[in-house]
Amino acid sequence: MRLRRLLAVSTAGVAAALAISTAAVAVPSGTTTSSAVAPDSLRALAAKIGLRIGTAVIPFDLNTANYAAVAAGQFSVVTPGNEMKWQVVEPTQGTFDWSGADRLVAFAQAHGQLVRGHTLLWHNQLPTWLTTGVANGTISDAQLTDLLHQHITTEVTRYKGKIWQWDVANEFFTDSNPSGINPNDFWVSHLGAGIIPQAFRWAHEADPHALLCYNDYNIAGEDGSNAKSDAVFAWLQQMLAQGVPINCVGDQGHLDTQFGFSGTRMTQDLQRYASLGLKVAITEADVRTFVNNATDQVPTDNLSQFAQPFEFGQMLKACLAVRQCISFTVWGFGDADSWVPGFFKGEGYATIYDVNLNPKTAYTELQQDLQLAAHGAPHRTGIGADS
Ligand code: XIL
């Protein structure tokens, strides 16, 4: 009901704001704002300050009306959760499946949304033919390099001009203190750490206008020690000094209420990346907690219902506080579609809509933060000095 009401409201002002919202960064052409967008939606509020609010999407779920309505109505940038990963796009060597990725790009274009491409170089979700071939020696390191080059060129070329930001490289740093590039990573162990900047160069050749990002988790102080952020920062400095075409840093933002989290530190870390001349983005925000079961996802600790939206709000505020933070993406919007119950035993409740697609407190938290950001907090009066 609420969704229908929200979608029924449209203003020309919002459409105009969305159209101009990302000045100064490359925005793919061909994106139109066709459908009605409610003025109090996340995307409309964020548009007033040039911020894009995003979500990971399961492309074939877009055939479900309720799901599609939220995806289109609330978000101005979308990421395929899995459908641009190598495992999905080339399940058999030389046989491609672009159906999910194409579906998402078409949806985005029809709804005035941009697309974050995810991800070209990662140790996970590689096709079995590739990992098996490497393991049994039928794919040599030289062939592996060529295959990667071909993969990046094919995929980036296919979506040339249609992708706003590409997560070129994903999760290369260790969680240790001090942190560094993981020598045991699939790619690094076979091809050396130089394969990471090489991937950026190949992506840049295929689409010179896309923003190319390094994406990772716990790189904005979520590890408490800031060790991973320090290592990524030092590496980025080196890469930029060498002229590697890196344009942005994506902090995934997968939080868990059982651990501490400092929004202040996140702000400082994002600002530090930005000081290198990079854009920054929150790319996979979710906040998980312990739940009764994976179906209902009711938090087992009453305080979670306060901690969960609070941490979402802290992340958004960190992004809002840094001018170069150009997008804030949640990793799926509904608890029923979240990756969390499948990956973290006993946990869930990680998104901003519940299992029935009703907005949760975390949704309201983000909406209110954006409302304040959009209009500017009012000047305080009558509190002593001037009363
Ligand atoms: C997750 C997807 O959401 C799941 O559906 C899939 O089974 C595994 O990957 N960091 C990333 C994302 O960069 O690609 C991951 O997505 C979540 C962690």
Image: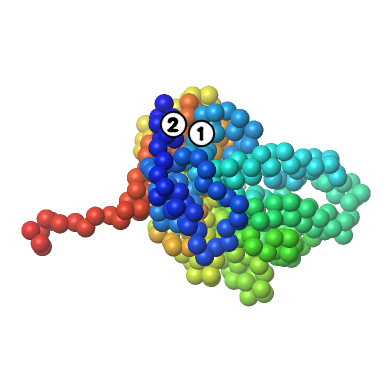
Name the spot of residue 334 as percent of width and height, x first: 51, 33
Q: Residue at x 70, y 45 (%)?
A: 85
- Any part of residue 81 in sight: no
Q: Residue at x 60, y 40 (%)?
A: 107
Q: Which residue is mark 2?
A: 3
- Amino acid type, residue under disc 2 in the picture: Leu
Name the spot of residue 261 as percent of width and height, x first: 43, 50
- Calculate the distance from the C-alpha at mark 1 to the C-alpha at mark 2: 7 Å
Q: Quadrant of the N terminus?
A: top left
Q: Residue furthest left?
A: 387
Q: Residue at x 65, y 49 (%)?
A: 118
Name the spot of residue 69 as percent of width and height, x first: 51, 34
Q: Residue furthest right?
A: 138
Residue 152 sits in which quadrant?
A: bottom right
Name the spot of residue 188 as percent of width and height, x first: 74, 58
- Amino acid type, residue under disc 1 in the picture: Ala
Q: Which residue is mark 1?
A: 69
Circle 2 SS class: helix
Q: Is 95 displayed left or right of 214 in the figure?
A: right
Disc assigned to residue 15? none
Q: Residue at x 85, y 44 (%)?
A: 93
- Whether tag 1 and tag 2 are in contact, CB under 8 A, the answer is yes
Total marks drawn?
Answer: 2
- Any part of residue 21 in sight: yes
Mark 1 or mark 2: which comes first in sequence?
A: 2
